[in-house]
Amino acid sequence: MMDLQNTIFEREDNIAIITVNRPDKRNALNKDVRRELRAILEEVKADPRIKVLVITGAGDKAFIAGSDIAELKEMSPLDFHRFAATLGQQLYTDFENLEIPVIAMINGFALGAGLELAMACDIRVAAEGARLGQPEILLGIIPAGGGTQRLTRLVGAGKARELIYTGDMIDAAEAERIGLVNKVVPAAELRPTVMELARKIASRSGVAIRLAKKAINKGANGPLELGLAYEAAMQCLAFTSEDHAEGLGAFLEKRQPEFKDR
């Protein structure tokens, strides 16, 4: 993997943790950070021992406060098209399509590209002081890292339009109320809460979780009929696994299952 200058990559047992490490810039995403994130994703994909990925920002001020605006200002329309297909939209989609669950640990501002990356994660847990929003409209541009699409799917068209058209930020409590984040906890409890959740997920069948995520993602943006058919196909695959036999056997024998992720 490339030498990491702007991110930190750690592992705790079968949980991987990415920290965007630019606290002096409120962890804004420039191209160098984005390249490092892409390299880390490849590392995660290649390691079957990793069952959950957590992403956060360094310090207590920001998760990720957006994109590097100076870089955006220098882009031509063609530059942006290439950027969206590689380090922009596509990078967030790569997080979304990662086979294992991804948890966003939101420890401060999650704005613009930061919120777009968080929305590409499976689960979002925020500290009480977090602030979230899509303020691109204030710069004369629109959310273009998936913000117009994922925000609408998460909170509904009406609320998404309001947030995008105004560029307003909301606090963590409001984000939880509208379904933008799963849970809000005191800042001191953020990492312990996220790691407890990650460990719980990691204790389940890795085979079943990967298949469940595929079914969820496949059905999220298509007709119900297609989603149901894909769900049934994923269940058939689950029935071929050793974890399936262990899980059902443990239930009938009234004991805790010992999943092998096979």
Image (cartoon, rainbow, N blue to C red):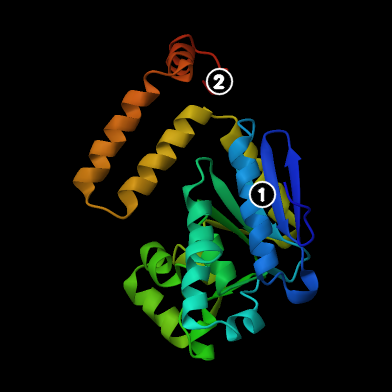
**Residue in the image at 57% along x and 19% along y:** 260
Can you name the residue that lies furthest to the left here?
Answer: 225
Can you name the residue that lies furthest to the top here?
Answer: 253
* Near-viewer residue (99 or 134): 99
Q: Position of residue 132 (x, y in %)?
A: 57, 73
**Residue in the image at 49% along x and 60% along y:** 90
Q: Check disc 2 and report the residue beneath it.
A: 259
Q: What residue type is labelled 1?
A: Ile
**Residue in the image at 47% along x and 15% along y:** 242
Q: Where is residue 67 in the image (x, y as percent from the top left)?
A: 61, 75
**Residue in the image at 52% along x and 90% along y:** 138
Can you name the residue that lies furthest to the front here?
Answer: 78
* Near-viewer residue (28 or 201): 28
* Near-viewer residue (156 or 37): 37
| For discs 2 and 1, the disc positioned in front in the rendered view | 1
Where disc 2 sits, the SS reads loop
Give the alpha-carbon distance from disc 2 to disc 1, as whole Å: 26 Å
Residue 52 falls left or right of residue 216? right
Q: Where is residue 47 in the image (x, y as percent from the top left)?
A: 63, 34
User: Can you see residue 197?
Assistant: no
**In the depicted structure, whether residue 142 falls above or below residue 110:** below
Q: What residue type is labelled 2?
A: Phe
Callout 2: 10 Å neighbours few (<14), some, many (20+)? some
Where disc 1 sits, the SS reads helix
Task: Say the numbered circle drawn on residue 40.
Answer: 1
| Picture quadrant of residue 71 | bottom right
**In the depicted structure, whether residue 247 falls above or below residue 52:** above
**In the depicted structure, whether residue 119 falls above or below residue 159:** above
User: Can you see residue 11?
Assistant: yes
- Asked if the residue at tag 1 contacts the one at tag 2, i.e. Cβ–Cβ closer than 8 Å, the answer is no
Callout 1: 10 Å neighbours few (<14), some, many (20+)? many
